[in-house]
Image (spheres, grey):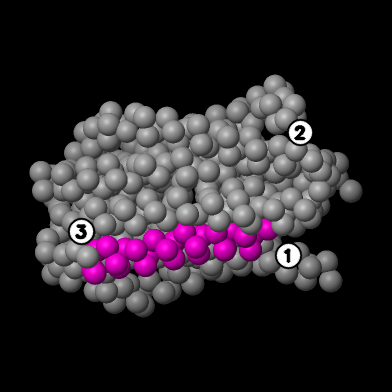
Amino acid sequence: MADEFIHRRVWRLAGPIILANISVPLLGLVDTAVVGHLPGPHYVGAVAVGALVFNVLYFGLGFLRMGTTGLAAQALGSGNADEVRATLARAVLVAVALGTVMVVVREPVTWAALAIVGPSDAVLPLADVYISVRIWGAPAALANAALLGWFIGVHNTRAVLAQQLVMNGLNIVLDLVFVIGLDFGVAGVAAASLIAQVAAPLFGLWLVRRDLARIGGRWRRELIFEGTRFRRMLAVNRDIFLRSIILISTNVVFISVGAKMGDVVLAANAILFQFHHLAAWTLDGFAYAAEALTGSAVGAGDRPRFREAVRVTGIWALALASGFTVAYLVFGTLLIDIITDVAAVRETARVFLPWAVIIPIVSVWGFMLDGIFVGATRVAEMRNAMVVTVILYFGAVTLLVPAMANHGLWLAVTFLSITRAVTMGSMYPRIERAVGEAT
């Protein structure tokens, strides 16, 4: 009965998140598809480069989601309702402040980002338009990340589903209206994202009220700004930030190295990377469930419950990753043809499709370990593992790309997934031993 209970609990947490997360890469696929039918690969390349810039910015600030989840879950597990509320307030305040800074420094950030990626002359002006429009949504986008993290931490993943469906559903509808209906092109894709990102946190704040009534407690200004707790949040967030920046640098290298191989390779890689994003965001449903369950177990000092959460979430994640590998093997070519009708891009994407097929099964381990480490707020170890992983990845790119061109680039990405799992896996036993007392 206990085993059946934990399986149900995992699915109650992971199910809504999986549905919510699927909407994120589906949005990426729609973004790519609506411009993939415009004349020329440079439209796809521009959206890929522009989206990469925001992936770097938002993923780099991913601590606003991950750190909030771990801290809220541990406060909930320890029964401290006032701290659960304070965790939300701190996260939203920091998110809005950081988003405002991004808007203020938007011009040098845009210049630096495009200089690093180095897109072609055809892609560059379109990517600049995309970034210039979408950057205004930064405060709202980061506040939304904080809200999502808090919902996961308090085990309300249905709110995550509702919030993500509102944001990404609205974005998809506006994509179709602005690009296909009104012919706004790349600027239309960016405007759709901007509007949806502003709507999402407003809806999320409305959803928060029910959770606050369920959890109880009260808002305490002195607790929100208490130095020790604020410093702990900042320390956790600092390590996640460093880890995220290191990890996102691998995507920057992937896109920029591919861009130097021409617009067709850049567009083909962007399409196949959407396959990877679809699998990653879906598998993250179980990683998020692991964050909430392991975080609560750490807060309660319950090592057996921690182990069981790790075991059950891992089983389901592996099963789903295997399903993605089979699905891409069978339907990958069809998906490529749906996303773009540019013949050269289709042909190139088919050549490199096998790499997209195998990545879900090799990357799932890193996703799950991320969730475990975040739930336990052992983010310094996660950061250190990522440093080792990325150094090895850069070495692989340096050696493999000159010898194997784009195949070498994809092999390096695959090697990154394997190394990430091995380095973090080597640290897991120490984290488990630190949870409470064995019973």
Query: Can you give x and y, in whole percent of width and height, for residue 438 in the image?
Result: 85, 45
Residue 168 is a magenta residue: yes
Q: Which mark is residue 165?
A: none
- Residue 81 is covered by the magenta coloring: no
* Other-residue count near label 3 (Cα within 10 Å), few / some / many at <14 / 14–19 / ≥20: some
> Eyeballing the image, is 93 above or below 314?
above
Q: Amino acid at mark 2?
A: Arg
192 lies above or below 430: below
Q: Residue furthest top?
A: 227
Q: Please identify, in this view, whether the residue under mark 3 or under mark 2 is nearer the observer.
A: 2
CA neighbours of label 1 inside 10 A, class few (<14), some (14 to 19), many (20+): some
**Can the viewer see residue 31 in this picture?**
yes
Q: What is the distance, in whole Å, between disc 1 and disc 2 at their CAs?
A: 32 Å
Left or right: 151, with 94 as reference point: right
Closer to us: mark 3 or mark 1? Answer: 3
**Label 3: which residue?**
185
What's the distance in space between the residues labelled 3 and 1, CA to CA?
44 Å
Q: Which secondary structure dominates the residues rendered in magenta?
A: helix
- Horizontal and vertical percent for residue 320? 53, 68
Stretch of the chain drawn in magenta:
155-181
Q: Which residue is rendered at x = 30% and y = 52% of the image?
A: 190
Q: Residue at x 74, y 50 (%)?
A: 212
Q: Are marks 1 and 2 in contact (CB under 8 Å)?
A: no
Which residue shows up at 30% across the image and 68% down it? 176
- Residue 53 falls left or right of residue 230: left
Residue indicated by mark 2: 220
Say which residue label 1 marks: 9
Name which residue type carries label 1: Arg
Quarter of the figure that contains the N terminus: bottom right
Q: Which of 236/6 is in front?
A: 236
